[in-house]
Structure formats: structure tokens, C-alpha cells
Amino acid sequence: MAWLLLSLKKATTKKTMVTVTDKAKEKVLSLMQEAGLDSSYFLRVSVKGGGCSGLSYNLDFDNEEKTGDQFFEDKGIRITLDMKSFLYLAGTELDFSDGLNGKGFNFNNPNASRTCGCGESFSV
């Protein structure tokens, strides 16, 4: 019975956390190194009102915890979201593309019902 509860807890945690792909991990680490940031910094992912679909994604580095922050770690990348953003981004995968069709971070957000053509904004 205990193994079932542990399995359910792991499945639930994995489903609600924000994850990163290997390409996104490499880019985040590269950007942190270029900016001279130490291990006290983490990736802050947030949602703001705006964009052509109503909500837009925001990425930044931060080293100050705020009340209500939700912390995750995937592939060695520490990620935090404020509670409002967590409600919109639970289960999202952060990816990075450097191909001919566009360069930058992409959000694979299972909560988005509609995204704009550039992928920088969404609605639920």
C-alpha cells in the first residue's frame, strides 16, 4: 500500500511541475554563465497579461524568494513560479529551438486552449 501512495505522489508531482528539455537546460546554463550568475540564482517563469492571445510568458533570472513561490528542479535547473503563474503553467515543458523556423524558448503548455502564431502568448 505504501508503494502505491508513493507512486501516486510521484505521478502527481511530475504532472504539476514545470520541466525543461535538454536543449532548454543547455541554453539556460549558457545564459547564466554569460551573465556571470552563481548557483544562488534560479529561473523565474511567469505569466503576465498581454500579447495577442491575452497572456504572455516571461523568463528571468532571480535569486530572491517571494511569498507564495513554487519551486521545482528538473535536470539540475532550479525553477520558480509565483502562485498565479503556477495555476497557468502546471505541467508545462520549457524547450529551446535554434532552428530555421525560429530561435528561442518555447512553452509546451497543456493548459493553453489557444496560442498565437509566434507562440509567445496564450489563453486558457
Image: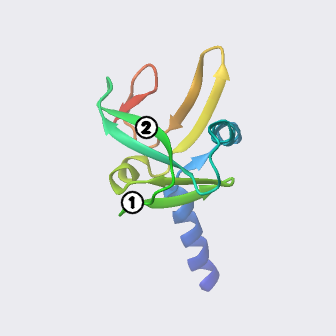
Tag in front: 2 or 1 = 1
Q: Amino acid at mark 2?
A: Asn
Name, please, the residue furthest toward the bottom.
1
Residue drawn at (48%, 54%), measured in percent from left and top? 80
Residue drawn at (49%, 41%), measured in percent from left and top? 60
- Badge 1 local density, few (<14 within 10 Å), some, or many (20+)? few
- Badge 2 local density, few (<14 within 10 Å), some, or many (20+)? few
Location of residue 48 in the rendering, given as x and y in whole percent from the top left corner:
33, 38
How is the protein colored in the picture?
rainbow
Tell me which label, 2 or 1, sits earlier in the chain: 2
User: Is label 2 in contact with label 1 (beta carbons under 8 Å)?
Assistant: no
Residue drawn at (51%, 64%), measured in percent from left and top? 12
Location of residue 72 in the rendering, given as x and y in whole percent from the top left corner:
55, 59
Location of residue 39 in the rendering, given as x and y in whole percent from the top left corner:
64, 55
Q: Secondary structure at mark 2?
A: strand
Q: Quadrant of the N terminus?
A: bottom right
116 versus 62 height, above or below: above
Q: Secondary structure at mark 1?
A: loop
In the picture, measured across the screen, residue 114 lies left or right of residue 39, that is left
* Closer to us: 31 or 109: 31
Residue behind mark 2: 58
Q: Amino acid at mark 1?
A: Lys
For marks 2 and 1, give the CA distance.
16 Å
**Whether residue 52 is visible:** yes
Location of residue 49 in the rendering, given as x and y in whole percent from the top left corner:
28, 36
| Count of all numbered marks drawn on residues in the image | 2
55 versus 68 height, above or below: above
Query: Mark on residue 66?
Result: 1
Name, please, the residue furthest toward the front.
36
